[in-house]
Image (tube, helix red, strand yellow):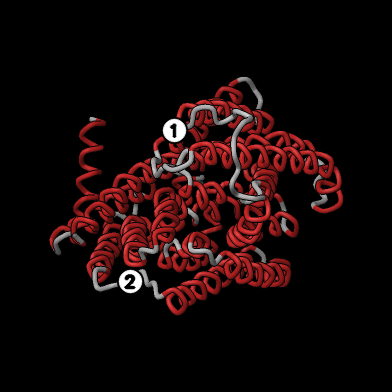
């Protein structure tokens, strides 16, 4: 019985993670292409202006949802099969409130733009950039909650279609089109606005098909505002503070340093967070499963999902990590251009924090979905304040290196404390003996990268591609020779089937 139960768990995790990874990695790949395109078209200075606006927009959007995306994932399982009317009431209320929050904060950003541009950042050209991004605000917030709502039945494909790949791909196409029309900085932002609005309309259409009569007035809401906000406020602030640790350095670099330096730091910072894409893809299915198993009181399945998902994130990331560590200058030159290679040392420092984040797995959503969002809120709030203070001290004195040190140090504190708290209080731990296979495979892959760089040191761009290919091949073959675990074999078969269908 237990074996059958684990098989069902693994198949659900494999299927959902596969769709989530395709969406997250595909969307991120398009996002990276878009970022590279913007960086090359605008150059470091104007890319720095764009980056300040983009970061502020995303910075505010984390709390602008009011946590409604988390609310629907946390509470919807109660009604999914038993009470369709209450489910519609929950979704209707969550989407409606997110629209109000998004519009309100969008207006706030619009009217604060002159003050932020001239008084805070001392960059007058930033005013028009911020006002354009403010128009983008409501659509981003609504899209976040609508996409989360399509995942409550643990089906990921709709979120992938609408948010992960659809919006980013449309945005890139529009960027290219507007650039050809001569609209550079303005065109980049306009492309994002239009693509988000279209994605919202498609998402709502899908949601109506999934849950008919969702916008019927006669629905029952069995979750009170008090219960919703009692959960959502600490959950959204805890999640926001955790992510703010990734972003506050970018905002403060934009404040203290030149737009050129900000453009360099933005590109390096984006590259260092490539592992978040993998985590996001896996989390798309893992978070609803956390909520479901916690609701059922199934601690064993909860821990198994945590372990397997963490292992997969590490396995997928390590071959990429090796190339970034061994050849940072070559990677930056290959992706962004030779003018960005001055950020190589900054990238290496940022990777330390990302490595800790990677090895602690989905610890933040695990805390939220098991009802410990208040602890995450307190911990992340303290770390966020520490991060701000350290950035204010180090960025003016040692520049971009100081920002990178602050970020990695703060991430290390945040995720390691959360990991050991989960171990002590919940009795959940993501590691077991299965990880030794990955450690051996990683050592061999890193050796392969180093030898490839040593032998082909004269061909930078093609060398990066070759290093990445060697790393993936050596890592994969090493795992296969050591014999794949059951869940890994299932995941490999899923990827094999997906590739066969694609070709």
On the rendered image, what quadrant is the C terminus found in? Answer: top left
> What crowding class fits label 2: few (fewer than 14 Cα within 10 Å), some (14-19), or many (20 or more)?
some
Reply above or below: 88 against 491.
Answer: above
Q: Horizontally, is 305 left or right of 209 in the view?
A: left
Q: Is residue 119 visible?
A: yes
| Badge number at residue 431 | 2
Q: Work out whether residue 294 or residue 376 is closer to the camera in this orientation and state it.
A: 294
Q: Quadrant of residue 379?
A: bottom right
Q: Quadrant of residue 113?
A: top right
Q: Work out whether residue 276 or residue 491 is closer to the camera in this orientation and state it.
A: 491
* Label 2 SS: loop
Reply above or below: 198 against 409.
Answer: above
* Label 1 SS: helix
Distance between mark 1 and mark 2 Cα atoms: 33 Å
| Badge number at residue 161 | 1
User: What residue is rendered at 22% in x and 49% in y?
Assistant: 492
């Amino acid at each position: 019985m237990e074996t059958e139960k684990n098989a069902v768990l693994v198949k659900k995790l494999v299927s959902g993670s596969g769709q989530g990874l395709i969406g997250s990695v595909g969307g991120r790949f398009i996002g990276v292409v878009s970022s590279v395109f913007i960086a090359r078209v605008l150059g470091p200075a104007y890319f720095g202006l764009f980056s300040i606006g983009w970061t502020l927009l995303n910075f505010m959007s984390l709390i602008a949802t009011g946590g409604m995306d988390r609310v629907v994932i946390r509470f919807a399982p109660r009604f999914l099969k038993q009470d369709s009317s209450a489910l519609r009431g929950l979704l209707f209320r969550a989407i409606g409130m997110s629209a109000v929050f998004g519009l309100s904060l969008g207006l706030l950003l619009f009217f604060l733009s002159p003050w932020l541009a001239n008084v805070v950042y001392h960059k007058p050209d930033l005013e028009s950039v911020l006002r354009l991004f403010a128009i983008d605000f409501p659509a981003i917030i609504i899209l976040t909650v609508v996409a989360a709502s399509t995942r409550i039945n643990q089906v990921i494909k709709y979120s992938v279609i609408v948010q992960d790949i659809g919006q980013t791909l449309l945005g890139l196409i529009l960027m290219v089109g507007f650039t050809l029309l001569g609209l550079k900085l303005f065109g980049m932002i306009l492309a994002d606005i239009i693509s988000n609005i279209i994605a919202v309309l498609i998402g709502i259409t899908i949601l109506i098909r999934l849950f008919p009569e969702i916008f019927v007035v006669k629905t029952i809401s069995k979750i009170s505002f008090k219960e919703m906000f009692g959960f959502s406020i600490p959950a959204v602030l805890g999640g926001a503070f955790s992510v703010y640790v990734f972003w506050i350095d970018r905002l403060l670099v934009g404040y203290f340093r030149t737009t050129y330096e900000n453009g360099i730091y933005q590109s390096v910072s984006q590259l260092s967070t490539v592992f978040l894409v993998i985590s996001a893809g896996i989390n798309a299915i893992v978070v609803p499963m956390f909520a479901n198993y916690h609701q059922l009181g199934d601690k064993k399945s909860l821990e198994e999902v945590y372990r397997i998902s963490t292992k997969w994130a590490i396995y997928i990331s390590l071959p990429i990590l090796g190339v970034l560590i061994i050849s940072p200058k070559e990677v930056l030159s290959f992706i962004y251009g030779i003018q960005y290679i001055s950020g190589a040392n900054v990238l290496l420092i940022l990777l330390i924090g990302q490595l800790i984040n990677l090895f602690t797995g989905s610890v933040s959503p695990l805390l939220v979905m098991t009802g410990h969002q208040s602890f995450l809120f307190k911990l992340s709030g303290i770390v966020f304040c520490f991060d701000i203070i350290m950035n204010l001290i180090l960025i003016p004195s040692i520049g971009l290196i100081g920002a990178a040190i602050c970020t990695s140090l703060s991430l290390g504190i945040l995720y390691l404390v959360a990991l050991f708290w989960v171990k002590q209080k919940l009795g959940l731990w993501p590691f077991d003996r299965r990880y030794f296979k990955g450690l051996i495979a990683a050592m061999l892959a890193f050796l392969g990268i180093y030898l490839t760089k040593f032998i082909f040191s004269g061909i930078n761009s093609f060398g990066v591609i070759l290093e990445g290919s060697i790393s993936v091949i050596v890592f994969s073959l090493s795992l296969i020779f050591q014999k794949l675990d059951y869940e890994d074999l299932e995941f490999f078969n899923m990827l094999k089937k997906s590739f066969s269908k694609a070709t």
